[in-house]
Image (tube, rainbow, N blue to C red):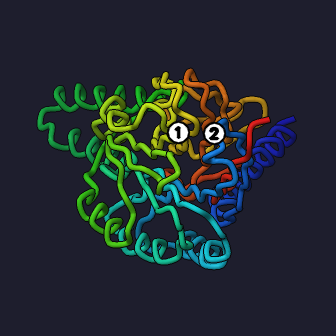
Amino acid sequence: MMKAWARLLGGGLGLGGGMLAYAWMGERPRMRLQVYRVPVRSSRAAGLRLLHLSDQHLGGDSWVQKQRLRRLQVLLPRLQVDAVMLTGDFLHDQEGLRALETLLQMLPPAPLGTYAVLGNHDYAQYSYGELFRSAWANIQHSRESQQRLSVTGQEVRRLRRLAWQIYSNERLRFAAVPNPTAELQALLALYDVQVLLNTAVPLGDRGIWVAGVDDWVEGRPDVAQALAAVPADATLWLLSHHPDVAYHVHDRRLELVLAGHTHGGQVVLPLMGAVHTQGTLLPRQHPAGIFDDLPSGARMVVSRGMGESTPLRFRCLPEVVVVDLVPES
């Protein structure tokens, strides 16, 4: 009987280890091209093709990042698009600026321009390592045994609260290390990327305006300010890193929303769905893709993203998104 239980336990540990290894290196380098056909009400937009990139989470050189960049070097120049939309989280840490410049050099020509918003990680890196280091440092700095016991209890409760937030799919913000936001914006400007922080610009002379909202978590989002200059008869598109912004906009001019942030859940389990959708309103069973339940009547495309905050993906490939706008039937 004991041998049977030992074999069962060993098999379970082996299966779990294999799944963890697959989640770490099986899917993360496998960048896919995802094409969405999105119906639009306005004839101004029908027929346009958009490239939507999100959540690169670029950092220092790693084998996964190198493989992704090689894949993008093949994939991106072949695409013919009218405009490029970048919805934030370019950086994982400050070392990602060099890799971002490599990516920007790969972008295909965009006759109608390239536009971007910033994500929460473009302002700060959330570091599990820093989280545990700070907890250990706080404990070590406690000189008396009674004080050390009290501090240890506080840190354990803090980590337990974080675990509960992940499980209950709440919005996370912890151990934030500043990222070089100003340098990032300067680099984007160098490559003619218009960063839209609570502002809007016309998309050529088509009567389409593109608005961008600052990040919902780390930035200073102001939807009213972003839409203030948009003409009353314009067709409106909205870029937002965090998809929840779209559920706070009731403007009927709004036709299309592009967002990211959820990473598609990264780890998607049978029956349960996404383990964590980054604390958004989106359901675990549908944390990315096309959404048509917005109060404005617009449609939203949420990308699975190109990178990760935690280096795991399971049943959730990273993606480059192309949006083909078609007439609404």
Question: In percent of the image, x 33 and y 33: which residue is there?
Answer: 228
**Which of marks 1 and 2 precedes in the sequence?**
2
Foreground pick, 318 / 216: 216
Q: Is residue 233 visible?
A: yes
Question: In percent of the image, x 48 and y 38: which residue is there?
Answer: 234
In the image, is residue 254 above or below residue 111?
above
On screen, residue 155 versus residue 208, left or right, reads left
Kindly identify which residue carries mark 1: 235
Residue 143, position as x, y percentages in the image:
12, 38
Mark 2, residues whose alpha carbon is within 10 Å: few (<14), some, or many (≥20)? some
Kindly identify which residue carries mark 2: 42
Mark 1, residues whose alpha carbon is within 10 Å: few (<14), some, or many (≥20)? many
Q: Residue furthest left?
A: 143
On screen, residue 224 versus residue 291, left or right, reads left
Question: In percent of the image, x 80 and y 48: which residue is there?
Answer: 11
Spatial CA distance of label 2 from label 1 is 7 Å
Foreground pick, 43 / 196: 43
Answer whether labels 2 and 1 touch (C-beta < 8 Å): yes
Q: Is residue 318 visible?
A: no
Foreground pick, 159 / 267: 267
In the image, is residue 166 above or below residue 94?
above
Question: In percent of the image, x 26 and y 45: which residue is there?
Answer: 134
Residue 111, position as x, y percentages in the image:
53, 67
Q: Which label was assigned to residue 178?
A: none
Label 1: state its secondary structure. strand
